[in-house]
Amino acid sequence: MNKRTGLGIAMALLASSSQAAESKLNLPLDYGLIRTALIQQLYTGEGGSARLWKDGKECSFLDLTDPRISGDNGQIKILNTIHARIGIRLSGKCIPAMEWRGDLQTLQKPTVAANGNQLSFPVTAIHAFDQNGAGLNIGELEQLIHKAVEPKLAELKIDLNEVRPDIQKNLARLVGAGQQAALEELVNSLHFKQVVADDKALQVGVIFKTLKPVKKSEVAEAAFSPEELQQWQSLWLGLEMTLDNSISKPPLEQQSEQVKLLLRETLQEAGQAFEQGLTQTVSKAEDDPVRIFFKQSWDKLAPLLRKASTNLPAADSLRYLTLIAATDMIYELDNIGSALGLEISSQGLRKIARSYLQQPVAADKPANDA
């Protein structure tokens, strides 16, 4: 799954509608997704490395590896392992005159383009440290790092014009034939309004044209077959295992045992409610187990599921985030009025879950292509 598909899904599956002529929705882009985009755009060398500079004989170079992304006072912080060498070639051999390894930290300010179509991340600060944590104090190397790193890392972009086809393709599976024109209109109207980096994710404000709500489909979405239910149970078990593993790692490991127990219980309640909604006939909306669960617990569970899914291999992580984001979308649409015929109910969940299960499972790629 490429960066356009992954980020396009994450953005598109949170689109919704309201009563105003122009609607706005704030959505989180997890730093795991930003890291995936960065790797696919820049870290394409051997072992997932990014060669930011080299001389004509490749005797001197500057490589970055293992980018780690987080939020830092309204900016994104990227911490890399850096390997720099300045050498000379004699008698066909490269003789290192200087070789240095350490960590490189950049701060980058998320910025919305004037036309609203693109997010960029210009570099505002660069700091290099050796393997003992001491600041770099080699003038020539400092100059090289600043000259090479700033323009390269600033190349990271999230461009709506690039992802619009993927947005429409992935949402098209979730709406009926009668809403395809409305979907195209909504996707074409999407624009970034603002972006803020917080501790957990990029909070992106997206604006789009308001569409008129449509009547809910009278065609019932069939209950899951035993084979479909088995696939769903396998999927949910994977999420439960990922969650349990995440609780044992920072930052969730610092939560109290009572909080951890509550998180596990909430996920278990979700699994039970969703399975009932996928398989059982519900005659009254107020008795729908999916609606009941969302009213009580989704706001608490969804952030945890996003956090847990980013610990999966890249391909699986994006697929799980697709499912979670799509469910978020149904929740938002139900709260403020749907223009695409989606609803938060057992019927709506069956539709999104079927679409998800029908996606081909992508094999994990090597680290440099994850």
Image (tube, rainbow, N blue to C red):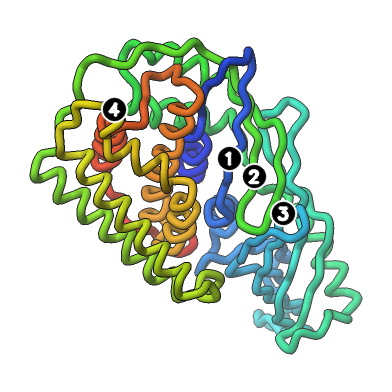
Camera-near label (1 vs 4) is 4
Asked if the residue at tag 2 contacts the one at tag 4, i.e. Cβ–Cβ closer than 8 Å, the answer is: no
Camera-near label (4 vs 3) is 4
The residue identified by callout 3 is 152
Q: Is residue 351 left or right of residue 70?
A: left
- In the image, residue 178 sits, relative to residue 264, either above or below, namely above
Asked if the residue at tag 2 contacts the one at tag 1, i.e. Cβ–Cβ closer than 8 Å, the answer is: yes
Q: Is residue 251 left or right of residue 280?
A: right
The type of residue carrying mark 2 is Gln
Residue 221: quarter of image: top left
Q: Position of residue 241 (x, y in %)?
A: 32, 66
Residue located 82% across and 67% down the image: 144
Does label 1 or label 3 sit earlier along the sequence? Answer: 1
Q: Is residue 157 visible?
A: yes
Q: Residue furthest left?
A: 226
The residue identified by callout 2 is 203
* Within-10-Å neighbours for mark 3: few <14, some 14–19, many 20+: some
Q: CA distance from mark 4 to mark 3?
A: 53 Å
